[in-house]
Amino acid sequence: MKALVSERQIANETRSSGKPAGIKRNVNGVLLLDKPVGMTSNQALQTVKAIYKARKAGHTGSLDPLASGLLPICFGEATKISGFLLDADKEYAVECKLGARTDTGDAEGRILETGTVPTLDRDYILKVFSRFHGGITQIPPMYSAIKHQGQRLYDLAREGIVVPREPRKIFIHALELSGYSNDSLAFNVRCSKGTYVRTLAEDVARELGCLAYVNALRRISVGEYRSMYSLDEVRHFSQIGFSALDNLLMPIDSALNDWSKVQLGAEAVWYFQRGQAVMAPGAPTDGWVCVYGNGRFLGIAEVLSDGRITPRRLLETG
């Protein structure tokens, strides 16, 4: 599938915000972007970065061009917590075509095999789904970004090379049936990081006694994030001005809402911001915490065995 956005279009976004070309802004926060079908995650990132005229930005977990949905874009200091969003659980809405298998596991691939589809009923599908709840193992597909001896698997796959892949442990929190017919299956899955939905669809179909590939995929949540803005909405707010754009951003610490939080006094803040461990009343006995002081989010710290907290990610947003 051809990408919807060209490099020329991305360059045009850079000239659309009213500031001279080349001038970049210090933007901090998380944009919850609804990536459209047909655009790579990097194209979405570069388009939004250009609209915001941002100095620094990164996305948190690629979506294939075939897929749409939630792609958190971290601007500025938010890139320091992007790894935690990569580790977050995710939820997808999946539509599968039954009766065929492709080399990529999705509708963009070449059909390798076709077969009959047995008569399906809801009870049997739910029984099969139950086998995939909890901790399971997956063999990553050849069309993935995993490296083998320094080469991406998808590069090898395009050359017709297949190499052994080690099974990986994943966790399926929920697998819910949305609908089915004699040649299609739709479900929602909430899963751990590292889950390949295309592989899950193939494995479920195998248990049902048929073949399948993914023909539509939408990510509907990342961690606690569920709402999102389309590119058209972002472009609309860009016509109003940077303040309107910046109001779309989530605070950096919103990505860590389920973490413990500690408040530091003025003296402790001074030492903490200089990389020193400090005592933090009310901190848990272990783990990582969000640290606040002087009315703002200071960064992320780890609790030491002696009860102090030591900075691991310091933010410069003051």
Image (cartoon, helix red, strand yellow):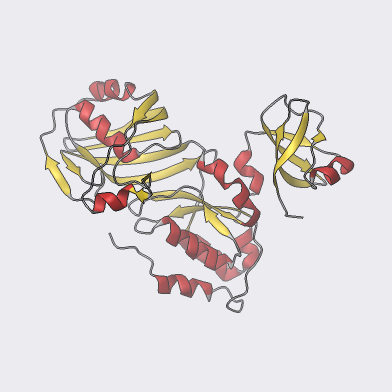
Q: Quadrant of residue 3?
A: bottom left
Residue with the most extreme bottom position: 20
Residue 48 position (above or below residue 309): below
Residue 189 position (above or below residue 68): above
Residue 158: image location, x then y, percent: 25, 53
Residue with the most extreme front position: 149
How many discs appear? 0
Residue 200 position (above or below residue 53): above
Residue with the most extreme right position: 267
Residue 210: image location, x then y, percent: 17, 32
Residue 200: image location, x then y, percent: 31, 34
At 21% from the left and 46% from the top, the residue drawn is: 103
Residue 57 position (above or below residue 147): below
Q: Is residue 151 left or right of residue 74?
A: left
Q: Is residue 79 left or right of residue 89?
A: right
Q: Nearer the viewer, residue 252 or 126?
A: 252
Q: Nearer the viewer, residue 269 or 256?
A: 269
Q: Quadrant of residue 258?
A: top right
Residue 202: image location, x then y, percent: 25, 35
Work out whether residue 170 can be spotted.
Answer: yes
Q: Is residue 273 left or right of residue 258?
A: right
Q: Is residue 291 left or right of residue 91?
A: right
Question: Which part of the image, by quadrant, shows the C terminus?
Answer: bottom right
Question: Which part of the image, by quadrant, shows the N terminus?
Answer: bottom left
Q: Nearer the viewer, residue 47 or 56?
A: 56
At 57% from the left and 41% from the top, the residue drawn is: 84
Work out whether residue 236 can be spotted.
Answer: no
